[in-house]
Amino acid sequence: MDLTQLEMFTAVAETGSISAAARQVHRVPSNLTTRIRQLEEELGKDLFIRENQRLRLSPDGHNFLIYSRQILGLVDEARRVISGDETRGTLALGALESTAAVRIPSILAAFNQRYDGIQLDLSTGASGTMLDGILEGTLSAAFVDGPVLHPVLEGVPVFDEEMMIIAPISHQPITRARDVSGASLYAFRANCSYRRHFEGWFLADQAMPGKIHEMESYHGMLACVIAGAGLAMMPRSMLESMPGSHQISAWPLAEPWRWLTTWLVWRRGARTPQLDAFIDLLPAYRGGWPGQK
């Protein structure tokens, strides 16, 4: 069974005539007769009742016509989406947890309202996980810590994040990594760019963190810090959005570790109409261009 057979069958079903259907699909009548017979043999059912040089759909033919029309309709929609003739389809988007929580909800809402024909699928995770998704083709684009230096990826800077060290409420001021050398840390897994940034802050000051406890969420990190179990690092925007942030003390990292820029990245040469529509919304909803700290 192939699309040509479905097109021929549907044309005959709708016109009731081999000759009329042949004109519609630009084939000779004998070709339609042969291909429809082949389709019936493959299905093991008669799709037409043949009498007096006319064709009428059999009960099985009526049922099959429903599915044939659905299949041809989906194929036609897919062709329009891929060619860019219609803004429909799916946009698989990835984001850091903090970005998804506090930076892009208004963008997602505006996108869904403007492009109700596009199915937006959002997943969150560490930068490394998001980049793997783009390279493997499971994600169209992702918000990650950048810039991303990869030969097959490109993107645009979107948000500047001020990185904060958070500590128990009574902790002494933290001005450098040596102030907390040996302290227990709470962070995401090793493929998280924020964790690498945190570890790099220690290394640059010739200090060493203590045990690093891997967590799955910022809320878990905050809870551990409130309990006095150690330190964590997170964007100020994320910290200020969470209940309980008043129960800890926080200090921005010193330059040049203080600011990180979130980028939207995608595979070079693979921008789709759906992704273009999303990118077009960014300037109006991102709350300022990078550099406007």
Image: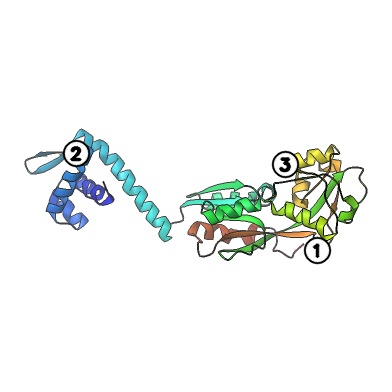
Q: Residue furthest top?
A: 59
Left or right? Give the position of 189 relative to 204. left
Q: Circle 3: is it few (<14), some (14-19), or many (20+) Cα within 10 Å?
A: some
Q: Who comes first in sequence, dot 2 or dot 3?
A: 2
- Of discs 2 and 1, which sits in the foreground? 1
Q: In which quarter of the image is residue 204?
A: bottom right
User: What x and y, as percent, mark residue 163?
Assistant: 78, 54
Query: Where is mark 2, residue-wise?
Result: 47
Look at the numbered disc 2 and give the secondary structure of its residue.
loop
Above-or-below relation of 53 to 253: above
Query: Where is mark 3, residue-wise?
Result: 215
Above-or-below relation of 111 to 268: above
Query: Where is mark 1, residue-wise?
Result: 256
Q: Who comes first in sequence, dot 3 or dot 1?
A: 3
Left or right? Give the position of 33 relative to 248. left
Seen at 39% across and 56% down, the residue is: 80
Q: Which amino acid lies under the numbered mark 1 shown in the image of this protein? A: Pro
Q: Which amino acid lies under the numbered mark 2 shown in the image of this protein? A: Leu
Look at the numbered disc 3 and give the secondary structure of its residue.
loop
Residue 157 in sight in this render: yes
Q: Circle 1: is it few (<14), some (14-19), or many (20+) Cα within 10 Å?
A: few
User: What x and y, as percent, mark residue 265?
Assistant: 60, 60
Seen at 70% across and 61% down, the residue is: 288
- Of discs 2 and 3, which sits in the foreground? 3
Q: In which quarter of the image is the C terminus?
A: bottom right
Residue 140 in sight in this render: no
User: What x and y, as percent, mark residue 205?
Assistant: 85, 59
Report the disc number at residue 92: none
